[in-house]
Image (cartoon, rainbow, N blue to C red):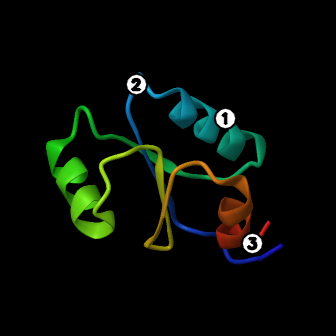
Amino acid sequence: MSSTPKKVILFTTPTCSHCKTAKRYLIDQKIKFKEVDVSQNPKAADDMVRKTKQQGVPQFWINNKPLVGFDKIKLNKLLEI
């Protein structure tokens, strides 16, 4: 496990079931993260699409590296857990 904390941003919408699962997973793993509801934040939604060319959520940005969707294997690798 890495000793350096990761900067984790999770882009979500309130109606996204995968977003709820992703959020629960981060909490269970005791990973600190900032949640951004793109349905309430058009600027963040624009930034997200500009960076990933994807509108889908959840999106994780870990130390500014994007991961689109809840892929536990890729997520764990980026989080170094």
Q: Position of residue 10 (x, y in %)?
A: 47, 49
- Crowd around label 1: few <14 · some 14–19 · many ≥20 (10 Å): few
- Judging by the rendered image, the residue that carries numbered circle 3 is 80
Between the C-alphas of marks 2 and 1, the distance is 14 Å
Of labels 1 and 3, earlier in sequence is: 1
Quarter placement of the C terminus: bottom right
Q: Going 29% across and 40% down the picture, which residue do you hit?
A: 38
Q: Position of residue 27 (x, y in %)?
A: 69, 41
37 vs 23, left or right, is left
Between the C-alphas of marks 1 and 3, the distance is 18 Å
Q: Going 16% across and 50% down the picture, which residue do you hit?
A: 43
- Crowd around label 2: few <14 · some 14–19 · many ≥20 (10 Å): few
From the viewer's perspective, is residue 3 above or below residue 15? Answer: below
- Judging by the rendered image, the residue that carries numbered circle 2 is 14
- Judging by the rendered image, the residue that carries numbered circle 1 is 24
Query: What's the amino acid at mark 3?
Result: Glu
Of labels 2 and 1, earlier in sequence is: 2
